[in-house]
Amino acid sequence: MSTNIPWTVRQGPRGPVPVYVLQFDARGTLTSPRSLAALVEDARDATDLVVVSHGWNNDWLAATSRYDEFFDHLDAVLRSHPPAPDRPFRPVYVGVFWPSAALVMPWERGPDIAGGGDGLVGELADELAVLSGDLGPELSAELHALLADPALADPGTGGDRADLAAEILAHLPVADQDETGATGTRVDGPALRAVWEDTLARIEPTPVRPGGIIPDDVPEGGPGEGGAAAPQVAGFNPLELIRSGIRLATVRQMKDRAGRVGGTGVAAALRRLADETPARIHLVGHSYGGRVVLSAVCNGPWPGRPVDSVLLLQPALSAWAFAGDVDGRPGGYRPAFDRVRNPIITTRSAHDLPLTRVFHLALRRRADLGEAEIAGLPPSRFAALGGYGPQGVGAEALQIDRMPDVGQHYPIGEHAVDSRYEVIGVDGTWCIPGHGAVQSDQTAWALLSQMRAAAHTDG
């Protein structure tokens, strides 16, 4: 962590650019109020605020390094395509840091531990730390004791212990509403175990790779391809089932955490920036960071002016988030259309294997298991926005088959071909080679195009 205020100062194309980092805890509480106060003062003289949120599995070093890299690309594009000399341009950059933990998914196989040492308690320490705050001390202790039981690996008795693990994790809180607008529904232990078993049957193991919750190199013929299940182990393996169940639970909790951080702390910070400064506000979210920024926009009262732009880079949320009708209700993030001045831009990539083949498996309930064969393909409710683009938006969405390169125009602002577009889905397959590979000149150009459109609208 850093106590620097601002965190650093970059040398931009038109002079110094302060960079702030706003830090939030798992509940969404701002833990760096002095940074926000200093940011507000700096933003009073700024023309543009660029606020970026990372996604899953980013510690402090990873998050700030990725912010640095993205801002490097943005500055490079600004140098090659500078703002008009007669227009003031004084940007301030902001990174959002929230605890997203180092996680391992079920297909990232760890060692089979049959006893000795800390066993699963040690192996799953990061995941258990994520879950403990939501489970509470009593259930956390019960889960730790269960995982430390040497009999856990016995196929004869392990099934009962898997049932107990599912019953414990069924007490985890559920979000009030997901991005499809559906109300959160608590599941019971048997339903949770059914999801674990089905998911484990559909995934193929790959070696653990440090630092990845969902690797970019999920193998060809991997999870659920063609609807065929690929058993991971021969026979019943209670250790593997419980290990995978805990990791799936953690993915859900991280998804909910992203929404909580965005909808509480980040939303409050944005309201203050919008109320107390004249700067145009541009939001960028990668992966679960898309959920952070959209939750910030859509939750609570909003100030008298909208956010100027939102850029979603391989967002790990439902492709139906903006839909007009999902089972009789609007998508959970559709209110953003009324709170963002210019069309939202969202990228997708066929190379994003986590979001095209894997992500949806972690988000099902037992009642949804029949959708497994189509879970990666629209119109399934589990298809990811970063894998397939916006669904159910109709004429309000524009689909661009090839993400514009630097210098090529986006149909927004002065280049708009139709003012009715609320969201623009761009296929970045040619320039986004994986889920995490979003720091590039092309993504920076998308943001700069949004910033130019906002400046043009201001006159």
Image: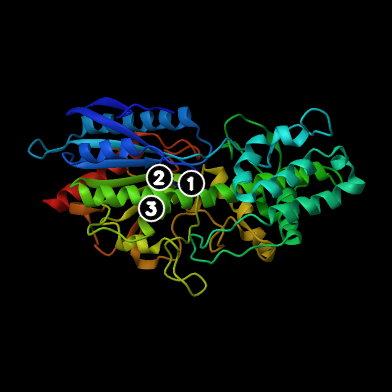
Between disc 2 and disc 3, the foreground one is 3
First in sequence: mark 2 vs mark 3? 2
Residue that label 3 marks: 296
Dot 1 and dot 2 residues touching (CB under 8 Å) = yes
Q: Residue furthest front?
A: 138
| CA neighbours of label 3 inside 10 A, class few (<14), some (14 to 19), many (20+) | many
Q: Position of residue 107 (x, y in %)?
A: 68, 41
Q: Position of residue 173 (x, y in %)?
A: 60, 56
Q: Residue at x 83, y 49 (%)?
A: 161
Query: Which quarter of the picture shows residue 52?
Result: top left
Task: Give, as a three-letter code, the residue at label 3.
Answer: Ala
Task: Give, as a three-letter code, the residue at label 2.
Answer: Gly
Q: CA distance from mark 1 to mark 3?
A: 13 Å
In front of the other: 427 or 40: 40
Q: What's the mark number on residue 288?
A: 1
* Mark 2 residue element: strand
